[in-house]
Image (tube, rainbow, N blue to C red):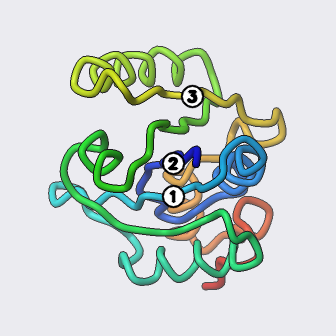
């Protein structure tokens, strides 16, 4: 069984995230959406809320699971028997950043491969950071998040 991990904070999940998950579900038998818990990061939405949104978004896709984790991503991959890490790319700067992480992960766990998936052009400007800023300023996020994200 080909298992892949799609790690992130998903604070909140965006249309770009959802698109990457949907597109890669055809490549893997099992996709684990890993909500990373970074104690030094302050989240807008609780882990419980983010988990509920993602589960609701993919409740019709039996290949998708949602779990939270802390610590090294490659250690979580090992725990979940995931030999692939999925990373979405919006731009060349994303690639440079993600390539460094992928190379470090490869050094730590040579058996785990990172798979880069470019996002659709319509989603290149959408980031969770921008969505949170829109929320803080009372703007509408309807065009940037899946329908399952209800505020």
Quadrant containing the C terminus in the rendered view: bottom right
Q: Are marks 1 and 2 in contact (CB under 8 Å)?
A: yes
Kindly identify which residue carries mark 2: 6
Q: Nearer the viewer, residue 118 or 43?
A: 118
Q: Residue furthest front?
A: 1
**Sequence order check: which comes first, mark 1 or mark 2?**
2
Foreground disc of the pair 1, 2: 1
- Report the side of 70 relative to 117 (left or right): left
Q: Residues within 10 Å of mark 1 (few under 14, many from 20)?
A: many
Residue 93 locus on image (x, y percent): 52, 18
Q: CA distance from mark 3 to mark 1?
A: 14 Å
Residue to which mark 3 is pinned? 115
- Mark 1 lies on a secondary structure that is strand
Residue 116: image location, x then y, percent: 60, 27
Q: Label 2 vs label 3: CA separation?
A: 10 Å
Mark 1, residue position: 32
């Amino acid at each position: 069984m080909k298992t892949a991990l799609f790690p992130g904070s998903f604070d909140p999940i965006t249309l770009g995230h959802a698109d990457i998950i949907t597109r890669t579900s055809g490549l893997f038998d099992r996709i684990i959406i890993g909500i990373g818990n970074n104690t030094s990061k302050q989240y807008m939405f609780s882990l419980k809320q983010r988990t509920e949104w993602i589960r609701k978004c993919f409740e019709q896709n039996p290949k998708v699971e949602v779990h939270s984790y802390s610590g090294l991503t490659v250690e979580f991959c090992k725990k979940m028997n995931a030999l692939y890490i999925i990373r979405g790319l919006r731009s060349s700067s994303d690639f440079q950043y993600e390539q460094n992480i992928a190379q470090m992960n490869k050094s730590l766990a040579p058996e785990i491969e990172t798979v880069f998936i470019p996002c659709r052009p319509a989603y290149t400007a959408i980031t969770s950071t921008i969505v949170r800023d829109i929320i803080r300023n009372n703007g509408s996020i309807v065009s940037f998040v899946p329908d399952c994200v209800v505020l």
